[in-house]
Image: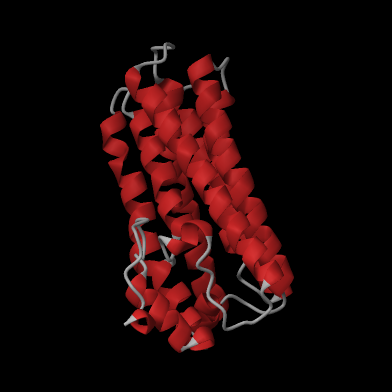
């Protein structure tokens, strides 16, 4: 199979999957599952690239890393979406309001845009798969270690938050335990670390440097679009002054020592 054929199959495969996902979401009247489809499809597309033709140990390592990322995030999102169904994520509720009168066709375009983003974010793994050098170099080793660190950090962050919610039923309480003492969003920080790890891994392949857009896109989305802004707006609305105090004392992204609380003065 030629490189062009591989890329065409991946691109059109994602367009078909997301069109089907859109139809499914229209049927259940909830567009939230697109988040889980996005994570899983990045993993599937990357694995398609990496495992299509007699993968070497370097490509298998990359496959394990992106497979672990997609499985963990896909499961996490699916569990959350299922728990809240039929209630829709607030982002999509707002889009329904913005697109009133043309909700379904606009969401179809939105889903197709997600298919394009999946293809773009999986391209680093296409370059790893196309790399003629099967040996581990410094970039692939360092990148794998950075991505693994991010995966471990994100998993710990989610577990700490889950444990907090299980032991503190007060909806106005703010988690300041473990990694959440040093960052308001350690899960988002480590998500960014994972993608910079993937980028470093890809630097060992020809044209790997061009994939800097992947961690840049992920980090931008986390900081400015679908990550911190809606999460914090929701937290302030639900938790009030307790969360505003948390914002004053705790780093929003990179884990840092917390500032003194205003109640300490």
Residue appearing at x 31%, y 30% in the figure: 208
Up the image or down, 34 lies above or below 71; here it is below
Relative depth, front residue between 3 and 165 = 165
Q: Nearer the viewer, residue 42 or 77?
A: 77
Residue 245: quarter of image: bottom left
Where is residue 125 drawn, in percent x and y?
Answer: 45, 32
Residue 34 pos. (x, y %) = 58, 62
For the residue pair 243 and 258, the one nearer the viewer reads as 258
**At 42% across and 11% down in the image, what residue appears?**
135
In the rendering, at what x and y percent does residue 201 appear? 38, 29
- Where, quadrant-wise, is the C terminus in this rendering? bottom left
Residue visible at 54% across and 79% down in the picture:
90
Instruction: Tell me if residue 132 comes above or below residue 4 in the rendering.
Output: above
> In this picture, is 230 found above or below 56?
below
Identity of the residue drawn at 49% across and 79% down:
235
Q: Is residue 260 left or right of residue 72?
A: left
Q: How many marks can you see? A: 0
Left or right of residue 244, residue 110 in this image: right
Residue 3 makes an appearance in the image? yes
Residue 36: horizontal and vertical position, in percent?
61, 57
Regarding residue 102, the answer to whether it shows in the image is: no
Seen in the image, is 187 located left or right of residue 254? right
Which color scheme does this rendered protein use?
A: secondary structure
Up-down: is 168 above or below 159? below
């Amino acid at each position: 199979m030629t490189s062009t054929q591989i890329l065409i199959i991946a691109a059109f495969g994602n367009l078909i999957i997301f069109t089907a996902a859109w139809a499914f979401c229209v049927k259940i009247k909830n567009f939230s599952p697109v988040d889980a489809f996005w994570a899983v499809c990045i993993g599937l597309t990357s694995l398609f690239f990496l495992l299509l033709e007699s993968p070497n140990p370097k490509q298998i390592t990359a496959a394990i890393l992106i497979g672990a990322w997609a499985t963990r995030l896909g499961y996490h999102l699916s569990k959350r979406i299922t728990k809240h169904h039929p209630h829709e994520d607030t982002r999509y509720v707002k889009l329904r309001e913005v697109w009133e009168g043309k909700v379904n066709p606009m969401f179809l375009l939105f889903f197709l845009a997600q298919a394009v983003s999946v293809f773009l974010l999986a391209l680093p793994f296409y370059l790893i798969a196309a790399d003629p050098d099967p040996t581990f170099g410094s970039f692939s080793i360092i990148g794998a270690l950075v991505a693994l660190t991010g995966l471990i950090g994100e998993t710990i962050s989610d577990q700490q938050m889950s444990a907090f919610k299980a032991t503190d039923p007060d909806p106005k309480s703010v988690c300041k335990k473990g990694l959440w003492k040093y960052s308001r969003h350690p899960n988002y920080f480590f998500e960014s670390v994972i993608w910079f790890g993937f980028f470093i891994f890809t630097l060992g392949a020809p044209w790997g440097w061009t994939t800097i857009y992947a961690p840049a896109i992920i980090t931008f989305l986390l900081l400015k679009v679908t990550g911190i802004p809606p999460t914090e707006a929701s937290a302030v609305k639900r938790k009030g002054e307790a969360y505003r105090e948390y914002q004053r004392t705790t780093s929003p992204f990179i884990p840092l020592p917390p500032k003194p609380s205003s109640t300490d003065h």
